[in-house]
Amino acid sequence: NLYIGGAFHHLNRSNQSFSSEDEDLYYSRFTVHAGGEFTLTERVGLVPGIIVMSQGPSFQVNTGTSLRFLLGKSRTSYQAFQMGVWARISNKIETGVLNDAVILSTRFDYDNFSLGFSYDVNVSPLKPASNSVGGFEFALIYKICGQERRNVYCPNF
């Protein structure tokens, strides 16, 4: 399974200023993402991914990989568990590239539901601002699947 996608935000660069003298425009934002799953064994797969975002003078790259363990699969049921390590890299205007965080993630898939959890560990010089405390993130996903087409039914990423 491979995927690639992209998005373009703020096409019209709307003006957010309070007066006609100010020129406070949103920069357009570009997003490109790609990834997939590579089977290592019948029950284990490698799930790498990358997302690149650029808006005006700022950019951010999240990249990493997870290991997916297939717990059970049939025509009507799917269960898997995955865990991975990711990195968030961004720019710091004065010095260039900044390795901002290491992200530890885990996810459990059950049929059309996924429950994910991640923790961002701050590894940048911005540690004092966060008191060296990372950030938690939870995700609940429900996939709305349509009819099977060409033997493809709700791909899993």
Image: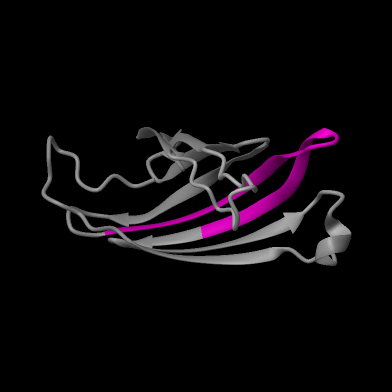
Q: Is residue 111 magenta?
A: no
Identify which residue is drawn at 54% across, 46% down: 66
The answer to whether residue 24 shows anywhere in this view is yes
Q: How many marks?
A: 0
Question: Image check: 87 left or right of 11?
Answer: right
Magenta span contains residue 101: yes
Position above or below: 111 against 70: below
| Location of residue 98 (image quadrant) | top right
Q: Residue furthest front?
A: 20
Q: Position of residue 25 (x, y in %)?
A: 57, 44
> Is 123 situated left or right of 47 in this image?
right
In the visual, does 140 lie left or right of 84? left
Q: Nearer the viewer, residue 80 or 23?
A: 23
Task: Name the image quarter holding residue 97.
Answer: top right
State the residue at coordinates (79%, 37%).
93
Give x and y (percent) for residue 26: 56, 45
* Image coords of residue 77 (percent x, y): 24, 59
The residue sitting at 68% across, 58% down in the picture is 120
Taking depth in this image into account, of 135 and 109 the one nearest to the observer is 135
Considering the image in quadrants, where does the C terminus appear?
A: top left
Residue nearest the viewer, comparing 149 with 32 = 32
Residue 37 visible in the shown view: no
On the rendered image, what quadrant is the N terminus found in? top left
Quadrant of the rendered structure where residue 111 is? Answer: bottom left
What residue is at 38 percent from the left and 34 percent from the top? 3
Magenta stretch bounds: 78-106
Image location of residue 104, percent across then percent down: 64, 55
Query: What's the colour scheme?
Result: one colour
Please identify the dominant SS of the magenta region.
strand
Q: Is residue 154 left or right of residue 11?
A: left
